[in-house]
Image: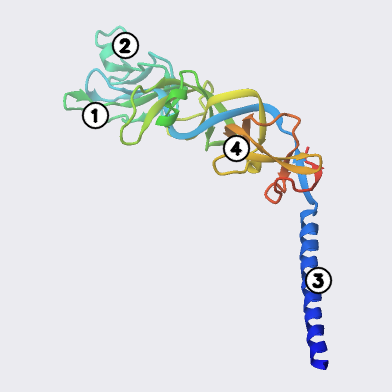
Amino acid sequence: MNLRRFLWLVVIIILILSAFRIINKVTQKKVQEERIIPVMVSTPRIGEIEYRVTLTGDIQANTEVNVRPRVTGRVEEIYVKEGDYVNKGDKLLAFVPGISEKSDIYEDMIVRAPISGVIGLQQIKEGEQVTSSVGNINPVFTLYDVRRVKIYADVSEKDYSLIKKGTSALIKIDAFPDQTFQGQVTRIRPVIDPLSRTTQVEIVLPNSNQRIKPGMFAKVDLILIKKSKVLIIPFDVVLGETDKYVFVSQSGKAAKKPIVLGLQQDDNIEVKSGLSAQDRVIVLGERVVKEGSSIEEATGQ
């Protein structure tokens, strides 16, 4: 009899413990389901967004001319030096010292600037002989017109249809790190390189003060698409691998909203559909909540 009572007692204890564990799990699950998750929310903003491509290239003069005399001979006088600005027709050097303008050979003995520009390279000195090679007289100066400068850069095939003459370009130059210069596309090569899958564009930059020099390095942002009055949210709050969505706050709960995206610029992205300007998008805590989670919100803007 004592053994039977003992066995019944053991069974009752086991049943009580089992019931306690079940009740405890149910209680914990209920508490967990009812846990309120703190989040930060923000309404989408309406503004402008752009699609840009960043390119690099070396700056070149608008025009570069190798100045060649009409005749060979010994240089007797030089009137300019590297860095000087000359106008078209200015005298650069002479083969005969003090030659009179009335002389019949004056124009052959004087070398003039064929264009207005800067003396970029002096290739002869007084007393040296100007010679010829392969039927051409060797150049004595290299002259650069830098009132405008050009940048040649390669653009990917996928962006070819978006580029047009007049496309705006924002240009950064290492020599002037605190300035942004503005230029525009003036020429587009009409073929695609089959190896690089790129095409070349020419970008012209005004340079009236002639501070920008040929050979400087430039980084160019081409603005290919610009939209205004669009709905914009931070890119980081967008979830989903293929089908994109965000969580919004609705009556103290997290609600999943599928969205269609547009242009991305830096950390922002355009929402083409799925949201309104009044929606309260979860921008902090969006990776913790689930559909229907209880939330407590703070305002991000």
Residue at the front extreme, as displayed: 1
Q: SS at mark 3?
A: helix
- Residue at x 64% of width, y 23% of height: 228
Q: CA distance from mark 2 to mark 1?
A: 21 Å
Q: In the image, which is nearer the foreground, mark 2 or mark 4?
A: 4
Q: In the rendered image, which residue does mark 1 sit on?
A: 129
- The kind of residue on which mark 4 rests is Asp
Which of the pair 250/217 is nearer the observer?
250
Q: Is residue 40 left or right of residue 111?
A: right
Q: Where is residue 154 shown, x and y percent of the image? A: 40, 32
**Are dots 2 and 1 in contact, CB under 8 Å?**
no
Q: Residue at x 68, y 31 (%)?
A: 275
Q: Quadrant of residue 292?
A: top right
**Which residue is under mark 2?**
100
Q: Pointer 1: residues within 10 angstroms few (<14), some, or many (20+)?
A: some
SS type, badge 1:
strand
Residue under pointer 4: 266
Mark 2 or 3 closer to N-term? 3
Residue that carries the numbered disc 3 in the rendered image: 20
The residue under label 2 is which amino acid type? Ser
